[in-house]
Amino acid sequence: MNILLVYPAFPPSFWGHTYALELLGKRGTMPPLGLLTIAAMFPPSYSVRLVDLNIEVLTDDDLLWADYVGISSMIVQKNSREQIVRRCNEAGVPVFVGGPEPTVFYDEIEGVDHFVLGEVEQTFAAFISDLESGTARRMYPAPAEEDMPPASTVPIPRFDLTHMDAYQSMPVQFSRGCPFRCDFCDIWKLYGNLPRTKNTEQVLAELTRLYDVGWRGQVFFVDDNFIGNWKKALDVLRAIEVWQKEHGFPFDFYTEASVNLALHDELVSAMVAAGFTMVFIGLETPNPEALQLMNKKHNVKKDDPDFLLHAVEKLQRAGLEVTCGLIAGVDGDDETSFDRIIAFVRESRIASAMYGILTVIKGTDLYEKMRLSGRLLQESSGSNTDTTLNYVPHIDPVRIAKEYQRVLSTIYDETLSNYFERCHGLLKRLKVVKHTKALLWKIKREELRAGWRSFRKLCFSRTTGPAYRWFLLKTLLMHPAKLPLAMRLAVKGYDHERHTREVVVALGSFKEESRKQFSEYKEFVAGVLLCLQEGWVETIKEHTASLLWDMRLRVHELRGCREGAHAHLEMFRREVRSYIQQATGKVLSLDEVEVTHGCGICDRAKEVISLNSQIDILCSN
C-alpha cells in the first residue's frame, strides 16, 4: 500500500525565519517530526513518502501514486490543510488526519475519511489493521491523560524520508507534556500534566540514527519543556555529553524550557556540557500581576521583582543564549506595558525576542474563561502575529495593534541599532566553553554563504550599515573568538527586521487602511440612502465592487503576508455584507456584485493578481 504523508505549509511568522533561510540557501527550518514518527509505525511492506509543503509542492503525480494521504496539522496550518484535503477529494484519494488541530477541531473538519487523534502509539496499529480489512472507523479518539502512551513506545523517526539538505536543523524529542498549567497554553491539555520521557537508550539511538544518515549541525529537542522532569533530563544530558565526546561533538543542540531552569545549576551545567547552546523560554511579560493572572506563577519570585532578568543573565553567563516569547494584550497589562517590554528586551540582552499578540486557543482554560465571560469573539487563527484579536481585551484593541507594531519596530528597528546593541551586550555576557567554541567554528558552506550575503546586504546599506559595521568592529576587537556567533546573529537580525517590516508592519498598515476605507464606504452608502435617487441600488453595487476589487488588489501586493491579508479580507467582506443588510434591508451576493459591477478596477486587479500568481509559481519552483 502506498502512503503519502503531507505536511501543510506555515504562513509567514518569526518562527519561519523565511529571510534567514533565503540567505542560507535553505527552504525550511526542520522536517515534521510527528509525520516522521508516524512513518516509522507502518509495516515494512508499506511504501511511505513524505511531502513537506514548506519546502516542496504537492503534485498530481504524488496523489496519483497514493492509496491514502495522511496529514498532521496545527491550527496555524488550517488553510493549507484545507487545500490539501480539497485536492485529495478531487483526486479521489482517501484522507486520514491527526495532530493538534484535528484533535481539537475534529467536529468542524470536512472532507476527511478517518481521524486518528491525540498520541497514536497505542491506536495506530489498530487503525492499520482496520484499513487492511476494510473496516476502518471514521474516528480513533485521543486517549485520556491517564491512558496516554509511555514515551518508551515511540519508534525512531524515519529521518531517511527527508530532504536533509533543504533544512536548517533536525528535530528529536525527549519528553511530552508539561508540569505547569498556564491558562493560555494547550500543551498540558493535549499531552498531559505529567511529563513522560524516553529512556536514555532511545535518545542516543535517535542521535546515532541522525549521525549515521549524515546529519551534522543544529538539532532541536522539540520538547515543550525539556526540563519538565528535570531529574530524568539530567540523566539523559550526562549520557549525551559522553556520546558527543565520542563522536566529536557533531551536534549543536537547542530546546525549549521553563525559566526555573535557572534555579538548577547542575542541570544548566549539564546542558552546556552536552552541547546545548541556546534555549527558548516563555517569559511572556515582565508584569508579575499579568503572570499571576495567566497562572504562570513559576515566572514570579516574591523576593525578587527582577527574577526574569536575573534568570536570563544567569543562563547567558553559564553559556546558554536565551531566546524568548513575549505576549501583548494579556489581562493585567496597562498602557505602560508596551514600554516595559521594550525596556525588558534591552536590559535582558535577548537578541531574538518573539513578540506576539495573545491568541485564545480552543481547549485552553483561557478559552473557557473568555467564553463564559462573553469575551470570546471568534476562533483563533493560530498566528500570534495576527493583529485581529479573537477576544475582547481590557485595553483598546486598536491601541494594542498599534503598540504591538511600535514595540517590534523598536526592538527590530530599521537601522538594527537596537538589535546590534543587544547582540554586543550578549557577546560580552555569554560564556563560551572549549567545546562550544569548537561548535561555533564548525561553519558549514551554507553558513559562509549566508554570512557573506548578510554582510553585503547589511554592511553597505544606508540604514543598517553604520550599526552593523560598528558591531562587527567591536566583535573583532573585543570578542574575536565569537565572530561566527556574531555573523549568525547578524543573519537573524536581517530576518527579524525584514519580517517586522514586510509582514507585521505591512499587514498592520493594510488593516488600518481597510478600517478607514470601510468608514468612508459607510459614509458613501449613508449619503446615497439619504438621497434615494433612481438607480441607488446599482450605485451601491458598483461602489461595493470597486471597493472589494481594490482590497483584493492590495492583498496581492502584500507578498510577505498575503495569507493574513486574505483572512482579513474575508472578515472585511462579512462586515460589508452585514452593513449593507442592516442599512438597506437587502442581502447582496458579494461574489455576484464583484463579477457584474467590477468597473475598470476589476480588469486591472485581475491582471495584477494573475501576474502575481505566475510569479509565485516561478518562485516556488
Image: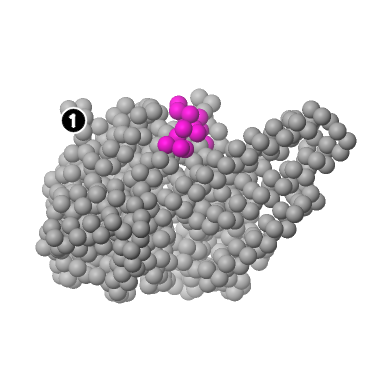
- Residue lying furthest right: 534
Relative to 261, does residue 534 appear above or below in the rendering?
above
125 and 23: which is toward the camera = 23
x and y, in percent, of residue 65 in the image = 58, 74
From the image, tell me which residue sits under label 1.
Answer: 304
Q: Residue at x 38, y 44 (%)?
A: 408
In the drawing, does residue 548 fall left or right of residue 300?
right
Q: Would you call the spot at circle 1 few (<14 residues within 10 Å), some (14-19), or many (20 or more)?
A: few
Q: In the rendered structure, does residue 401 fall within the stretch colored magenta?
A: yes
Kind of residue at badge 1: Asp
Relative to 564, does residue 49 appear above or below in the rendering?
below
| Residue range corresponding to the magenta coloring | 390-403
Q: Residue at x 42, y 53 (%)?
A: 499
**Residue 335 visible here:** yes
x and y, in percent, of residue 141 in the image = 50, 48
- Residue lying furthest front: 462
Q: Residue at x 20, y 41 (%)?
A: 311
Q: Using the rendered view, name the quadrant where residue 308 is placed.
A: top left
Q: In the rendered structure, does residue 207 fall within the stretch colored magenta?
A: no
Q: Secondary structure at mark 1?
A: loop
281 and 449: which is toward the camera = 449
